[in-house]
Image (spheres, grey):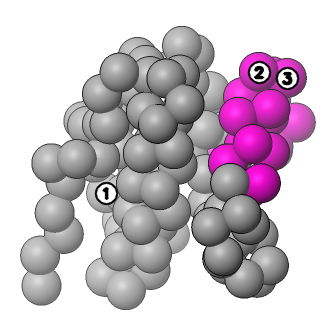
Amino acid sequence: MMGHSILNSYLTEQIVNFGKNLRVIGYQPGTIALYRLRVEDFLSWCADDDKAEPLDGITQQDIESFLEECRQRQGNRKVTLKGKLMALRSFFRFLVSVKKIKIDPTANIHLTG
């Protein structure tokens, strides 16, 4: 994965706004930092393949591929993958709520086991 500097100002702004929203709805600072890091990691992964922009171009398959790569290459266990999915789901739901995207690509992803 490439560094977070690959994210452009628009993506960075969305992540900052996401963090502000989490704070408003009562998330703890550690959780906000972790969610932001997980979103940044995913968007950096997408940017490696030119998928991160526009945000509404990200698909369920992209997220599933990212999670599978985390499992295979990074050795992430189920609990870590579920945490990453929770962060991504929160981010994409936020984007839908502020009308930056129309469809939440995480809506039909379910990790089993």
Residue 57 position in % (x across, y down): 40, 16
Q: Would you place residue 88 above or below residue 11 in this image?
A: below
**Residue closest to the eye, 74 or 54:** 54
What mark, if any, has residue 68 been given in the picture? 1
- The kind of residue tagged 1 is Glu
Closer to us: mark 1 or mark 2?
Answer: 2
Closer to us: mark 1 or mark 3?
Answer: 3
- Distance from label 1 to label 2 (Cα)? 27 Å
Q: Do the residues labelled 3 and 2 touch (CB within 8 Å)?
A: yes
Tell me if mark 3 has few (under 14), some (14-19) or many (20+) residues whose alpha carbon lies within 10 angstroms of its own: few
- The kind of residue tagged 3 is Ser
Residue at (16, 63) in percent of width and height: 110
Number of callouts in the render? 3
Residue identifier under label 2: 10
- Distance from label 3 to label 2 (Cα)? 4 Å
Residue 61 position in % (x across, y down): 24, 36
